[in-house]
Image (cartoon, rainbow, N blue to C red):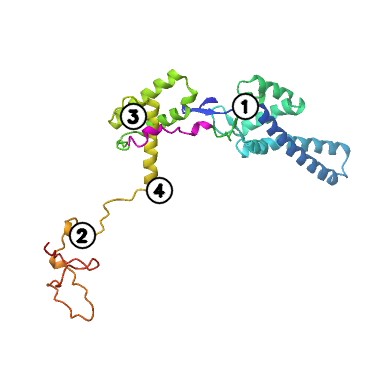
Amino acid sequence: MSELVTGEAVALELRPARLPSRALAVLLDLAVAIAVYVAVTIGLVAATASLDRAAQTAISIAVFVLVLVGGPIVVETLSHGRSLGKMACGLRVVRDDGGPIRFRHALVRGLIGVIEILMTFGVVACVASLVSARGRRLGDVFAGTLVVRERVPAGRTDFVPPPPPWLAGRFSGLDLSAVPDGLWLAVRQYLTRMRQLDPQVGWSMAERLASDLADRTGAPVPPGVPPAAYLAAVVQERQAREARRAFGSGAVTGGGQVGAAGVAGGDAPPVRPSAAVPPVVAPSVPPAHPGTAPRGGAASADRPSTGFVPPA
């Protein structure tokens, strides 16, 4: 990784492209440029057959300069540092501060590339790239650019190790609302990279992060629990809560299905008599008076409540 500092004093960690990937990208660009040059040359030979030898030579030189020199410059300028070969290899040309290149950067790289790539068959560019710490050729040094890798292979450090089985569910009662996102990110980065750290350094970092996390949650680290296992268990608890919140695996309790038992238990608020709905009766029975209750037992569960609770 190479650290670049932007104009806003922000450090960027980029992976510089090395010689094999850069050489493959240059070969692909040259193959495309030579194919275009041959096609244009064949067309011009047929179109300028009536001209004299000097005019044909001048046109050939102009086509060579425009296609093999001007073409890559235009392509890198319009694509902000991504030629066809670089797109195929997952590379991009950026400035020293990490920003996109402009026409002057592509122009300097293209003009010096004629000397170190075309005239010397790439020998100067290979030597300069091998000597440079960031794999830059002379064109990159004079233009103030750097070729970086855009497609970085996914590493194994993204996997957060699970806590020990005897810690599963032990921190389900912790209050995690006061833990900031920055602390969660620091804990996650430590857990994904703790196997790459020195044991003493990793232990001290885990103790410090566990102390910060315990201060935020208000619950100290249980005795006998290693700090790394404590961090992994708390992170797993947070992930489990987020999964339940996102996928709705935990149904919301207290939703309030109101029935006869709920009314008798006093969980539902009583209905005022003035707002009571007359009971629905069968057609064969004469309609009852709105203020009287039916005889013969309690009302059915599907009938609306009238606010009248029969004695126990």
> Residue 196, image x and y in percent?
50, 24
Q: Earlier in the sequence, mark 3 or mark 2?
A: 3
> Residue 261, image x and y in percent?
20, 59
Going by the numbered disc 3, the residue's amino acid type is Leu
Tell me the residue that label 4 is attached to: 247
Going by the numbered disc 1, the residue's amino acid type is Ala
> Residue 210, image x and y in percent?
35, 26
Tell me the residue that label 1 is attached to: 143
- Between disc 3 and disc 1, the foreground one is 3
| Residue 213 numbered mark, or none | 3
Tell me the residue that label 2 is attached to: 261
Which residue corresponds to the image point at 43% horizontal and 18% vertical from the top-left? 200
- SS at mark 1? helix
- Range of residues picked out in magenta: 156-171
> Residue 16, image x and y in percent?
59, 27
- In the image, residue 294 sits, relative to residue 147, either above or below, namely below
Q: Callout 4: 10 Å neighbours few (<14), some, many (20+)?
A: few
Task: Please say if the residues under marks 2 and 4 sit with CB atoms less than 8 Å apart.
Answer: no
Alpha-carbon span between mark 2 and mark 4:
32 Å
- Between disc 1 and disc 4, the foreground one is 4
Q: Quadrant of the C terminus?
A: bottom left
Going by the numbered disc 2, the residue's amino acid type is Ala
